[in-house]
Image: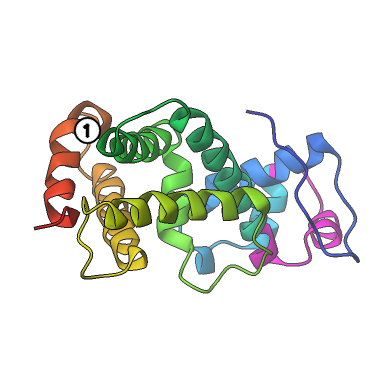
Amino acid sequence: MSISPLPTGSSRQKPSAAARARIENAALDLFAERPFHEVRLDEIARAARASLQTIYRHYGDKQALLDACVLHWANALAARMTDHLAGIETYKDRLRKVFWVVLDFFEQHQKVARMILGSVYPGAMRYDVTDQQRRLTNLFLEVLAEGRERGILNDQVSEAILLDYFYGVLARLIQMQSMRRQEPPLSAQVNVLFEMLWRAIAKP
């Protein structure tokens, strides 16, 4: 997948596509191996065959580089989610598709899953929310709000709480799958896994 330009601060120069791909791919490899605080910028520079000055010039610091990596993959997931939800008619099938897309995406990009689970914490990201990310979150919330309004999902809590349940189950499944390598892929178990989640959020 090609890496598209990301927004940077007004004082930052945009690296060439090739340089950026090398730097962010090297960062992904290292952030997937070890927690954020254990990775040094000079390691990333060496793996990317780039100078520290180049990284500082284009990103500013290590946190900004992590932000750029996460932003790229968040945008990729947002685009894929939008594509897959087109044309699905029944409410439950739409929610099932959201569940499957996220599981399948992180199965295909396991380094991204390890990077996010090992290095990204609530409130830690500094980048501005992109239109794609806002669309993705709003899409989830709109689907959940619709379910509450139609009497399908539990209406005793807000759609934000329902989203926390949804994300929480996904995050735990994705995290533990990498540790339970002998188990079948999560995407192969999507129907039973989704039904378990559905029973938790459906209206009693």
Residue drawn at x 71%, y 45% is: 23
Q: Amino acid at mark 1?
A: Val
Prevalent SS, magenta region: helix
The foreground one among 15 and 94 is 94
Question: In which quadrant is the C terminus drawn?
Answer: bottom left
User: As displayed, is residue 141 above or below residue 18?
Assistant: below
Residue 40 visible in the picture: yes
- The span shown in magenta is 48-65
Q: Judging from the image, what secondary structure is the residue with disc 1 in? A: helix
Residue drawn at x 64%, y 61% is: 129
Image coordinates of residue 12 in percent, x first then y, are 88, 61
Image coordinates of residue 73 in percent, x first then y, are 57, 44
Residue designated by label 1: 190
Image coordinates of residue 119 in percent, x first then y, are 48, 62
Image coordinates of residue 164 in percent, x first then y, are 32, 63
Give the total number of marks visible in the rendering.
Answer: 1
Q: Is residue 173 magenta?
A: no
* Horizontal relation, residue 15 to residue 129: left or right: right
The foreground one among 32 and 46 is 32
User: As displayed, is residue 184 above or below residue 23?
Assistant: above
